Amino acid sequence: MWNETLSDYVRAIDIAEVDLEDRARSVSSAPYELFGELWAREWGHAEKKEWVERAVREVVVSKGREPLSSRVEVELR
């Protein structure tokens, strides 16, 4: 069962990467627009998680009463 789940996950990631590359070649808009379209309309939780893990190395949230935006540090890869 684990092997099947892992295999399905890897297959979904491979399909998403190929789809992104194909669309990037065929779309004349900015890459951010393409990424946003895939994120909002086509990718499931697994694909979104994969891309976040590739982009973000670490997130640190400090304690305090200040707004969250001033207490969060994000380290990108």
Image: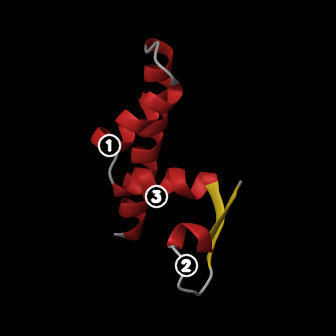
Query: Which numbered disc, 1 or 3, marks the residue that appears first in the sequence?
Result: 1
- Residue that carries the numbered disc 1 in the rendered image: 40
Amino acid of disc 3:
Lys
Query: Which numbered disc, 2 or 3, marks the residue that appears first in the sequence?
Result: 3
Amino acid of disc 1:
Ala
Crowdedness of circle 3 by 10 Å Cα count: few (<14), some, many (20+)? few
- Residue that carries the numbered disc 2 in the rendered image: 66
Question: Which percent across, then down, holds residue 38?
Answer: 37, 37
Q: Looking at the image, which is closer to me, 13 or 40?
A: 40
Crowdedness of circle 2 by 10 Å Cα count: few (<14), some, many (20+)? few
Classify mark 1: helix, strand or loop: helix
Label count reads: 3
Determine the CA span between mark 1 and mark 3.
Answer: 13 Å
Question: Which percent across, then down, holds residue 72?
Answer: 60, 70
Q: Is residue 44 above or below residue 16?
A: below
Of badges 2 and 3, nearer the viewer stands 2
> Which of the 4 image quarters holds residue 64?
bottom right
Picture quarter with the N terminus: bottom left
Q: Is residue 9 above or below residue 31?
A: below
Q: Which disc number belongs to residue 49?
A: 3
Classify mark 3: helix, strand or loop: helix
Of badges 2 and 1, nearer the viewer stands 2
Residue 40 relative to residue 67: left or right: left
